[in-house]
């Protein structure tokens, strides 16, 4: 199955799809898909970026065109299952002794709700936001790619992990990887300035299978 951005754009802007496919590998090296247990062993040491797509919402639709930041009534919000999942993710970090530094969320309600429930604190950063469109222009895709790549390549320093909580399209624009389902976590290793390596992912319910 094609990634979501590619599916939406292929019939209308074929050259744009090629830009995403060609430019993303220059920033994100192909990941080996390490198993969750190995990923946790890495992040217990700190020094990684952990991107978490927000937890489940009541409905799944593109709200970024009309969403007003600060007004949750104009946006998708977490479902009851999403609230429970966010709490369980945070509990897994505590149980597994994963050190957490900065917790950075997009300005969308479903993202900071996930951050608050999982980690009890967060700061918002508009660089994690969507562009206000459903069918993105090349300029909009490049803007999301650039902003997200900067965050994914920023070294958190020794002993701590930076948590990014955001959305599917910006992450896909930067990595070429569509993050599904909601609540999935990706472990990122920053390399040099502007570059990073995606080591693998942990599904929302995968934390339960990892021993202390």
Image (cartoon, rainbow, N blue to C red):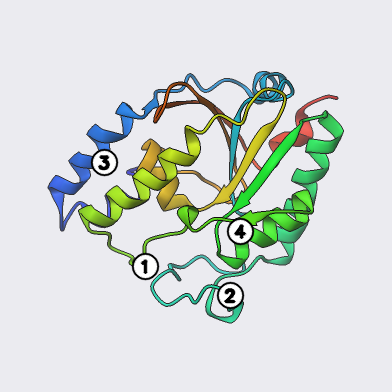
Precedes in sequence: disc 2 or disc 3: 3
Work out how far the residue at label 1 is from the one at label 3, CA to CA, in angstroms: 18 Å
- Residue 162 vertical placement versus 63 (above, below): above
Q: Is the C-beta separation of discs 1 and 4 under 8 Å?
A: no
The residue at the point 85 percent across, 25 percent down is: 212
Name the residue tied to disc 2.
Answer: 70
Q: Position of residue 52 (x, y in %)?
A: 60, 44
Mark nearest the camera among 2 and 3 is: 2
Query: Of the numbered discs in the image, which one, if any, rests on residue 132?
Result: 1
Is the residue marked by circle 4 packed among few (<14), some (14-19), or many (20+) residues within 10 Å?
A: many
Precedes in sequence: disc 3 or disc 4: 3
Query: Of the numbered discs in the image, which one, if any, rests on residue 111?
Result: 4
Q: Is the C-beta separation of discs 3 and 4 under 8 Å?
A: no
Q: Is residue 97 left or right of residue 64?
A: right
Is the residue marked by circle 3 packed among few (<14), some (14-19), or many (20+) residues within 10 Å?
A: many
Work out how far the residue at label 1 is from the one at label 4, CA to CA, in angstroms: 16 Å
Precedes in sequence: disc 1 or disc 4: 4
Query: Of the numbered discs in the image, which one, if any, rests on residue 4?
Result: none
Secondary structure type for disc 4: helix
Q: Is residue 55 visible?
A: no
The residue at the point 77 percent across, 56 percent down is: 117
Q: Position of residue 199 (x, y in %)?
A: 53, 24
Mark nearest the camera among 2 and 4 is: 2
Secondary structure type for disc 3: helix
Camera-nearest residue between 8 and 166:
166
Precedes in sequence: disc 2 or disc 4: 2
The image shows a total of numbered marks equal to 4
Name the residue tied to disc 3.
Answer: 20
């Amino acid at each position: 199955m094609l990634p979501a951005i590619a599916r939406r754009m292929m019939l209308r802007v074929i050259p744009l799809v090629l830009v995403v496919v060609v430019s993303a590998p220059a920033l994100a090296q192909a990941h080996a898909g390490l198993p969750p247990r190995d990923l946790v062993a890495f992040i217990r040491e700190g020094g990684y970026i952990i991107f978490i797509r927000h937890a489940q919402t009541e409905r799944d639709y593109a709200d970024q065109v009309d969403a007003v930041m600060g007004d949750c009534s104009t946006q998708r919000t977490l479902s009851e299952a999403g609230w429970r999942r966010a709490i369980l993710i945070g509990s897994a970090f505590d149980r597994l002794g994963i050190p957490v530094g900065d917790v950075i969320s997009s300005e969308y309600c479903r993202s900071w709700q996930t951050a608050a429930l999982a980690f009890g604190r967060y700061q918002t950063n508009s660089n994690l936001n969507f562009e206000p469109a459903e069918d993105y222009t090349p300029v909009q895709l490049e803007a999301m790619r650039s902003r997200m790549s900067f965050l994914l390549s920023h070294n958190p320093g020794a002993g701590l992990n930076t948590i990014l909580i955001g959305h599917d399209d910006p992450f896909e624009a930067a990595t070429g990887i569509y993050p599904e389902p909601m609540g999935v976590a990706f472990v990122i290793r920053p390399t040099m300035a502007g570059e990073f390596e995606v080591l693998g992912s942990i599904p929302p319910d995968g934390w339960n299978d990892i021993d202390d």
